Amino acid sequence: MGESTKFNARTSFRRLDSESRRRFLALAGGGAAGLAFALNRPDPAQAETTTKINSYPFRAGVASGDPLPDSVVLWTRLITDPLDYTGGLPATGRYRLDWQVASDEGFRKIARSGTVSAFAEDSYAVHVVAGGLQPSRRYWYRFRIGDHVSETASTLTAPAPNESRPLRFGFASCQNYRAGYFNAMRDAAGADLDAMLFLGDFIYEYGVVQIAAGRPVSGIPPEAEVTATRLADYRFRYGLYRSEDDLKAVSHNTPFISTWDDHELANDYESSPLDLDRRAAAYRAFWENMPLRRPQQPTGSDARMYRRLRYGTMAQLDVLDTRQYRDPMVGGTVPDEGGRRDPDLVMLGAEQEKWLLDGLGAKPVRWNLIPQQLLLARLNTASGPDQPTQFSGGTWDGYQATQQRVFGAIGDGLDAGTVRNFVALGGDVHRCYASTVPRDTLDPEGPTIGVEVTSPSISSALDFDPEANERAQIRRTMNPLLSWADLHCGYGICDLDSDRMIIEIRGTDKVSVREDARTLARFTVADGDRKFSSVDV
């Protein structure tokens, strides 16, 4: 829909039948129709902003997320100018928005509707949990304020608890605006996904300035040309990224299941003391700009991002937070001794680790997926085969005790039959690594428990460098469990059913220009195999 589009006559606010009109006017917090919530919401009696919005206010698009069988989060943020540090709207006040969910694209069959307030204190972002929906159903939704109607978007609910059907998830990470175009997101918009698993670095805190190898950058206000440290800085970056057409395209037809990495706050922020006010600002901006449920709403500098979503009996997704609770890294590159093996060094924190291990195998599913930020599999990062083994201190290898407890619990579950297939999905490293995961982190030649594939970056790796990619292949000779290493930008797709999972990596040679993605590799895991059944690269 264009900027001047109104609800069509068939479903206009004035022409709805009495039942639909009642639902449309219902407060979003009432009954099963929907629940609207906001961070530090002001007094609801606060007067509405009287300033009329003359420009199209949905420049950040709309999005949905964290689907359940009977509900999904609907999100939007009012912005009239993504290059304005304020978003183009008043610094105080509120606006009332109408929202609709329909079972058809023409909005002839309204499933749920309501009204929600967008407050300046929340940068005019809203979250609506549209409830009372049917499982495994595509729905269409939209927002309206005054004469302005958002683009029509669609979303998909999760399967019923006892349902077993094929699933198709995208997984992606590391989209740096200044580094390149989001070509992978444009491709994902046409991939017919059940959900996009976004594994962190949705924004980058660095100054938004032109770099030699990146996309053209212009019109950026001076405040954004330096590293983000304040709430306004982080909010601007989300507004800029959200206004990007390729990101809007996939957000408009695919629900997101999101977690964060480090650049939503600061590079490797757990490696040194950090201003808690800055952390609170970054966490708040993340919440405001992502389609998340109430349990993920931050309280100051704390937020629970880890959570579990089940897709019928086919898949369980244990979404992790490997940044907020972990101990400081013992170093950037560490030898296979000393600090990394410290049994007291924790990655997940005690509460999250217990939650993860207690939930693995608690309910039978065909595929246990762990979407998380970092490289989980064992990887020797030495510069050559004649060099001593070494590891990255920032990956799971740098926290070997936690790594071993998790691997051991998965192995125990496989032995007991409570875990059937284990697949980890990671990000952060700006390259795709396809690895088999050992049960014993110190014995890569021993039994295996499953596989891991890390997503390529959306744009952070810049244009493909064949020479650098050749050097990356040296690691395959030093790592018997590493099946593939590649430096293209792109994303992954997990296509799974009761017999197998196929992980397809799609990417482009360049992100400095618009370019269509292509398939780079496919990895197949047969039910019960605990390793890649085939590798097609």
Image: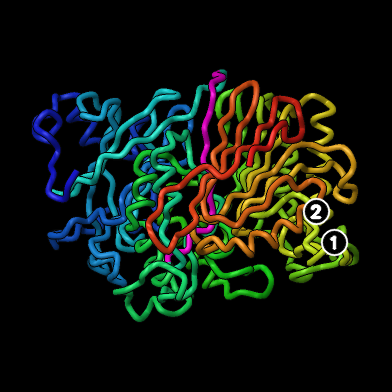
Dot 2: few (<14), some (14–19), or many (≥20) neighbours within 10 Å? few
Q: Which residues are magenta?
A: 163-177
- Residue closest to the eye, 46 or 58: 58
Question: At label 1, which amino acid type do we have?
Answer: Pro
- The residue depicted at 76 percent of the width and 42 percent of the height is 436
Residue 406, horizontal then vertical, whole percent: 78, 44
Q: Is residue 172 magenta?
A: yes
Residue 495, horizontal then vertical, whole percent: 56, 31
Residue 331, horizontal then vertical, whole percent: 77, 71
| Quarter of the image where one finds residue 223 | bottom left
> In this rendering, is residue 21 above or below 394?
above
> In this rendering, is residue 457 above or below 529?
below
| Quarter of the image where one finds residue 57 | bottom left
Residue position marked by numbered label 1 in the rendering:
385
Question: Considering the image in quadrants, where does the C terminus appear?
Answer: top right
Question: At label 2, which amino acid type do we have?
Answer: Thr
Question: Considering the image in quadrants, where does the N terminus appear?
Answer: top left
Residue 209, horizontal then vertical, whole percent: 41, 76
Left/right of residue 365 with respect to residue 41 in the rendered view: right
Q: Is residue 300 visible?
A: no
Residue position marked by numbered label 2 in the rendering:
477
Marks 2 and 1, the one that precedes in the sequence: 1
Identify the secondary structure beneath mark 1: loop
Which colour style is shown?
A: rainbow
Q: Is residue 488 visible?
A: yes
Label at residue 516: none
Left/right of residue 264 with respect to residue 112 in the rendered view: right
Dot 1: few (<14), some (14–19), or many (≥20) neighbours within 10 Å? some
Left/right of residue 98 with respect to residue 135 in the rendered view: left
Cβ atoms at labels 2 and 1 below 8 Å apart: yes
- The residue depicted at 45 percent of the width and 50 percent of the height is 184
Q: Is residue 308 magenta?
A: no
